[in-house]
């Protein structure tokens, strides 16, 4: 049987598309007749053979596009330009070291600035060193190298989540991580400052590559690992990096968000009063113990009602963090019984309130409308804080919690951190949720270290489980 089609059927079954043995045989006959050259014709034939209901056809379409069109991982040029090697602007400003340096790791590590990448006539990397691939800024070549490494180590054979780490490490070694680290060490030992800057650049890009490989392995695990039990699937999705999730899993994620919100609401809905032990309510205590002949068996303590917090959620909806904003807003709005005073704001450069949009439309339609209006333009946190202050500063008080979700990458614009300081001083809490790992804070155009100084809590958060923990802490502190 065709190994590729067998793997595809595994993916379908993992996505809850029921495929019988006879249907698998029919699919094999169809693939043998049509081949894999005409993808659209193959898709129609397999769909008619393997998918029965509308829900299964929808899952089939997602699986097909991901499996056949994404054998090579998709790395957008934007994602490549967001790595901390955005420091390339600093490097390119140097007269003695161009940003498109090609590393020759066989000789004296002098920069070869001819910029001739070692590729085949079809554009695939051929024995190109990992150092040269990373320095060339070619997202296609890096994606192809990742796909080739994944195939070489048989990443599709993963079965349990504990294998994700070892497979990621094996992929990096297959791509040439050991040689790259030797190159970095040799550059660091060179007395030339330009070589040191190249070493720093390569280290930053290697850190970026580690995250890309981890996302690639995560996607493969979600596709191929055996997850027949719903609980196991949910645990995997909660721990998966949101950036690695495809549309195939959005429906599962929405159901998981609702379940998480219900659990959080159940845990915290009863916390309406805070009891201060040590301040006895004498009148109520005496009244309660009349039947006990005045013996104080049943004491009553004074209590203080605490207002539910006013929550202001400010979400960067630019392309790099739009998925994180989506799930944060879904979780906050699913908690409306516990957090009834949530106001949501979206921005890329200018900021506006979107609370009414989420109140009037379904989550899918609301996300579409918000992105259409607010996701365009170059990200500008300074302008967003200025707009938010003009809209809400008078409403911010010591019962207010401000949640900011974004990567703090400001395109080298004016950060206007003083505006965030004012919000910090007026509010009860400022919580910043950053989808980037802390190792990337401050790299390139990231203003996160400056903003973090005016936050009560600044956390790296890139999974749904981490997001749940942050919201749970919020509820525990304010309910």
Image (cartoon, rainbow, N blue to C red):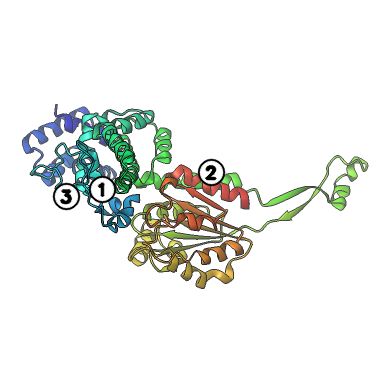
Q: Which residue is mark 1?
A: 75
Please state if 110 lies on the left or on the right of 353 as rendered.
left
Q: Is residue 245 visible?
A: no
Task: Looking at this view, name the residue that lies furthest to the front.
Answer: 191
Q: Secondary structure at mark 2?
A: helix
In the rendered image of this protein, does residue 335 appear above or below residue 66? below
Local packing at callout 1 (Cα closer than 10 Å; few below 14, some 14-19, many 20+) is some
Q: Is residue 243 visible?
A: yes
Q: Residue at horizontal 85%, vertical 46%?
A: 288
Q: Which residue is mark 3?
A: 115
Please state if 257 lies on the left or on the right of 62 as rendered.
right
Instruction: Specify the label residue 263 is tagged with.
Output: 2
For marks 3 and 2, give the one nearer the viewer.
3
* Image location of residue 314, percent across then percent down: 47, 61
Q: Secondary structure at mark 3?
A: loop
Q: Secondary structure at mark 1?
A: loop
Closer to the chain start, of discs 3 and 2, is 3
Please state if 184 lies on the left or on the right of 404 as rendered.
left
In the rendered image of this protein, does residue 456 appear above or below residue 52? below
**Residue in front for this viewpoint, 255 or 397:** 397
Closer to the chain start, of discs 1 and 2, is 1
Report the quarter where the N terminus lies.
top left
**Residue in front for this viewpoint, 346 or 4:** 346
Local packing at callout 3 (Cα closer than 10 Å; few below 14, some 14-19, many 20+) is some
């Amino acid at each position: 049987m065709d190994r590729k089609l067998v793997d595809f059927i595994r993916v379908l079954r993992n996505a809850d598309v029921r495929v019988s043995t006879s249907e698998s045989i029919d699919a094999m006959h169809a693939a043998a007749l049509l081949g894999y050259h005409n993808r659209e014709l193959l898709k129609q034939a397999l769909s008619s053979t393997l998918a029965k209901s509308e829900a299964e056809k929808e899952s089939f379409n997602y699986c097909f596009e991901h499996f056949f069109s994404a054998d090579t991982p998709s790395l957008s040029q934007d994602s490549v330009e967001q790595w901390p090697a955005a420091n390339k602007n600093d490097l390119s400003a140097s007269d003695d070291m161009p940003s498109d340096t090609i590393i020759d790791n066989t000789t004296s590590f002098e920069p070869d600035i001819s910029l001739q990448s070692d590729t085949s006539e079809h554009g695939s990397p051929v024995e190109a060193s990992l150092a040269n691939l990373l320095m060339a800024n070619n997202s296609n070549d890096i994606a192809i190298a990742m796909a080739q490494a994944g195939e070489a180590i048989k990443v599709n054979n993963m079965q349990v989540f504990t294998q994700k780490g070892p497979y990621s490490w094996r992929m990096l070694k297959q791509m040439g991580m050991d040689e790259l680290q030797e190159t970095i060490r040799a550059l660091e030992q060179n007395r030339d400052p330009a070589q040191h800057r190249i070493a720093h650049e390569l280290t930053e890009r290697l850190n970026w590559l580690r995250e890309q490989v981890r996302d690639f392995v995560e996607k493969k695990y979600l596709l191929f690992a055996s997850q027949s039990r719903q609980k196991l699937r949910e645990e995997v999705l909660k721990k998966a990096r949101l950036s690695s999730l495809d549309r195939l899993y959005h429906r599962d994620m929405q159901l998981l968000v609702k379940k998480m919100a219900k659990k959080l609401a159940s845990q915290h809905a009863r916390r309406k009063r805070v009891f201060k032990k040590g301040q006895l309510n004498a009148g109520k205590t005496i009244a309660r113990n009349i039947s006990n002949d005045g013996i104080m068996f049943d004491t009553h303590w004074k209590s203080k009602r605490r207002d539910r917090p006013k929550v202001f959620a400010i979400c960067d909806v630019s392309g790099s963090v739009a998925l994180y904003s989506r799930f944060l807003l879904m979780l906050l709005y699913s908690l409306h019984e516990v957090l009834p005073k949530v106001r949501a704001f979206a921005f890329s450069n200018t900021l506006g309130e979107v609370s009414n949009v989420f109140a009037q439309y379904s989550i899918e339609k609301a996300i579409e409308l918000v992105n259409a209006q607010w996701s365009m333009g170059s990200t500008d946190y300074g302008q967003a804080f200025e707009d938010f202050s003009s809209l809400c500063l008078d409403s911010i008080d010591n019962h207010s919690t401000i949640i900011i979700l974004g990567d703090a990458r400001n395109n080298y614009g004016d950060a206007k951190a003083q505006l965030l300081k004012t919000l910090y001083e007026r509010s009860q809490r400022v919580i910043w949720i950053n989808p980037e790992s802390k190792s990337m804070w401050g790299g390139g155009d990231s203003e996160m270290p400056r903003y973090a100084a005016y936050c009560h809590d600044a956390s790296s958060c890139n999974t749904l489980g981490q997001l749940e923990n942050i919201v749970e802490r919020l509820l525990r502190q304010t309910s």
